[in-house]
Image (spheres, rainbow, N blue to C red):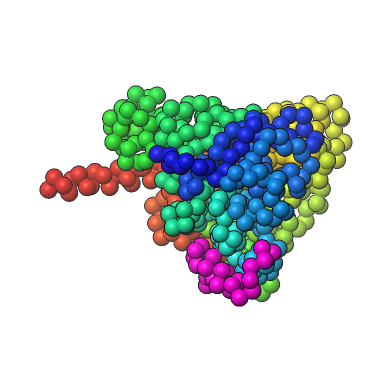
């Protein structure tokens, strides 16, 4: 139920923004308000302007980028342009997708002090404000820690603490859980829920995966693919009345809503409204257990091609700065196999992937690729056979346009220009970037950058593709399309090794799962067996996929009913 207030904190009127190198606006003609103490989900497909809008609301854009902003934004009745540089940031704080992009100091304490000093906080108050902000996010024990030693979840909490230390009226969260393991993601949402209740913060939350946010949300503001408002109203109305339209736009639905919609289409969900909670979902099913098969979207396990091994890791260990980052890891990848690597933030997943890609050399052990030690491959020859997609897509961009980024490796192979054009345009169409072919890669949204990084590897048709979190920041449609492209690669005999925090993807696509914890392999096997390993799940900060979670909920409901009858 949306909260009602007489005076909004923030008002936008006919707001539009266009990047200097693009003809069309990112978003256009936006009219909405944000009231004290309410939490609003800002939803929309990848590339519709959600992050750009967030940056406009606290004056980062257009001041920090070449672009044109039309319309007005007012805060407490005062136009944003009337605020002095940096002044509005006291009132409207933002936490970015990538917390490291906000840090400029070495230690946790120094990072918090930096912001407070810039806001001319009296020196005698700074210490108490630092402690107070760290206590709010459960990070006080790490006050003197070096930032680079923190896990991904801890870095996100630090970014949140830095904003909270300034006591903002509005907190904007731009996909704050995108880089977090499932347990850290849930913990962050609970911290934010506590803050909202204790401090009456107004929240504007940009997210794709919604399950952990629904219970703290009052309203949804939905943008369509053209950057226009599709819906602005209560959370319940949004997902009950507009679920099908949201799906058409590629917007993720909360799991109970998605399950209820599937059940309704199959004629086995009889609830009057689409459910927002598991309890409502279970109550609305004609036969709850029979419904599980429509929710479980597992792909057929790939049989591989004559059980041929394409990659073997033998007793890999990696030391850096006196620390054991990886310890004695062994496994193999078959031709035509989809292998997923998961684990908590800081468990060594990215380090392992960089070893396998030949970017790092192991301290001990060996890596065989196509029956040849990785160290014996020539660099150019290796890249034609083994592709690597970085966790941060910007780390691999080298060209001045989206088209040239994909064409670069093809030109090195001396492929005729006409063939290059055909191949590039085909893969751009596959990843929904054809209309952005001429713009600079850094002008893309985070989700679009991720798709470009994957496309630049897919075009080369390597034997093995290593991907580090390829689906984060993607809407439902583009995520499904990316996974479809990887499935096509598998079916044609290629192999995929993917790092992911997304348990739904792991459950649906992986033939084999490798779980890391503190640099060690603690599980290797099929997904179905993993969900029964409760201690491993806990140690690795994982959560079961929704179909498994719902199955457990149904068992619990059945058990309660049986207990009540006796």
Tell me what residue is drawn at x 64 percent, y 68 percent: 121
Q: Nearer the viewer, residue 474 or 517?
A: 474
Q: Nearer the viewer, residue 250 or 268?
A: 250
Tell me what residue is drawn at x 82 percent, y 42 percent: 399
Q: Is residue 131 magenta?
A: yes
The chief SS type of the magenta part is helix
Q: Position of residue 37 (x, y in %)?
A: 47, 49
- Residue 542 lies left or right of residue 403; in this view the side is left
Tell me what residue is drawn at x 55 percent, y 53 percent: 169
* Residue at the left extreme of this rendering: 566
Q: Residue 291, can we see it?
A: yes
Q: Is residue 531 above or below residue 256?
A: below
Q: Position of residue 304 (x, y in %)?
A: 57, 40
- Residue 124 lies left or right of residue 218; in this view the side is right
Tell me what residue is drawn at x 34 percent, y 33 percent: 291
Q: Is residue 104 magenta?
A: no
Q: Residue 337, can we see it?
A: no
Count of number-bearing discs:
0
Q: Nearer the viewer, residue 437 or 322?
A: 437
Q: Is residue 507 above or below residue 240?
A: below
Q: Is residue 247 above or below residue 499?
A: above
Q: Nearer the viewer, residue 450 or 79?
A: 79
Segment tinted magenta in the rendering: 118-143
Q: Position of residue 189 (x, y in %)?
A: 48, 52
Q: Position of residue 182 (x, y in %)?
A: 49, 52
Q: Quadrant of the N terminus?
A: top left
């Amino acid at each position: 139920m949306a909260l009602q207030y007489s005076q909004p904190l923030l008002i936008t009127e006919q707001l539009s923004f266009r990047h200097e190198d693009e003809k069309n606006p990112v978003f256009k003609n936006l009219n909405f308000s944000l009231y004290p103490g309410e939490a609003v989900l800002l939803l929309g497909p990848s590339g519709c302007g959600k992050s750009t809008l967030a940056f406009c609301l606290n004056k980062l854009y257009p001041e920090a980028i070449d672009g044109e902003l039309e319309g007005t934004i007012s805060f407490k009745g005062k136009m944003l342009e009337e605020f002095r540089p940096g002044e509005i940031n006291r009132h409207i704080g933002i936490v970015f997708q990538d917390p490291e992009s906000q840090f400029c100091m070495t230690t946790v304490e120094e990072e918090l002090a930096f912001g407070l000093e810039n806001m001319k906080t009296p020196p005698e108050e700074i210490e108490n404000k630092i402690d107070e902000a760290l206590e709010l996010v459960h990070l006080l024990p790490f006050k003197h820690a070096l930032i680079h030693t923190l896990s991904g979840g801890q870095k996100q909490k630090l970014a949140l603490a830095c904003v909270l230390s300034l006591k903002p009226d509005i907190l904007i969260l731009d996909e704050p859980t995108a880089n977090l393991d499932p347990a850290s993601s849930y913990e962050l949402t609970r911290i934010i829920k506590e803050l909202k209740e204790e401090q009456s913060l107004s929240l504007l939350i940009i997210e794709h995966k919604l399950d952990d946010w629904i219970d703290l949300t009052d309203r949804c503001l939905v943008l369509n693919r053209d950057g226009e408002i599709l819906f602005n109203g209560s959370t319940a109305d949004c997902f009950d009345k507009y679920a099908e339209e949201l799906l058409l736009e590629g917007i993720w639905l909360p799991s109970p809503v998605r399950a209820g919609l599937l059940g309704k289409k199959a004629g086995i969900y009889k609830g009057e409204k689409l459910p927002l909670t598991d309890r409502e979902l279970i109550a609305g099913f004609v036969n709850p257990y029979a419904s599980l098969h429509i929710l479980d979207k597992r792909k057929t396990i790939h049989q591989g091609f004559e059980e041929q091994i394409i990659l073997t890791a033998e007793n890999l260990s990696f030391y850096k700065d006196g620390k054991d980052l990886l310890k004695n890891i062994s496994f193999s990848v078959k031709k035509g196999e989809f292998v997923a690597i998961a684990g908590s933030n800081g468990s060594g997943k990215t380090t392992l992937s960089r070893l396998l890609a030949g970017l790092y050399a192991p301290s001990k052990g060996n890596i065989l690729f196509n029956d040849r030690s990785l160290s014996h491959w020539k660099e150019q020859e290796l890249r034609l056979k083994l592709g690597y997609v970085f966790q941060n897509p910007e780390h691999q961009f080298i060209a001045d346009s989206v088209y040239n980024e994909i064409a670069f490796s093809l030109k090195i192979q001396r492929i005729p220009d006409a063939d290059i054009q055909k191949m590039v345009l085909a893969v751009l169409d596959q990843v929904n970037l054809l209309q952005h072919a001429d713009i600079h890669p850094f002008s893309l949204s985070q989700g679009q950058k991720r798709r470009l990084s994957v496309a630049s590897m897919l075009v080369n048709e390597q034997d093995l593709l290593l991907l580090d979190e390829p689906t984060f920041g993607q809407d439902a449609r583009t995520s499904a399309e990316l996974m479809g492209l990887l499935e096509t690669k598998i079916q044609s005999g290629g192999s995929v090794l993917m790092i992911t925090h997304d348990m739904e993807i792991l459950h649906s696509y992986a033939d084999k799962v490798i779980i890391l914890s503190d640099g060690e392999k603690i599980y290797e096997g099929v997904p179905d067996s993993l969900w029964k390993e409760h201690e491993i799940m806990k140690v690795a900060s994982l959560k079961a996929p929704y179909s498994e979670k719902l199955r457990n909920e149904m068992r619990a409901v059945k058990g309660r009913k049986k207990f009540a009858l006796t």
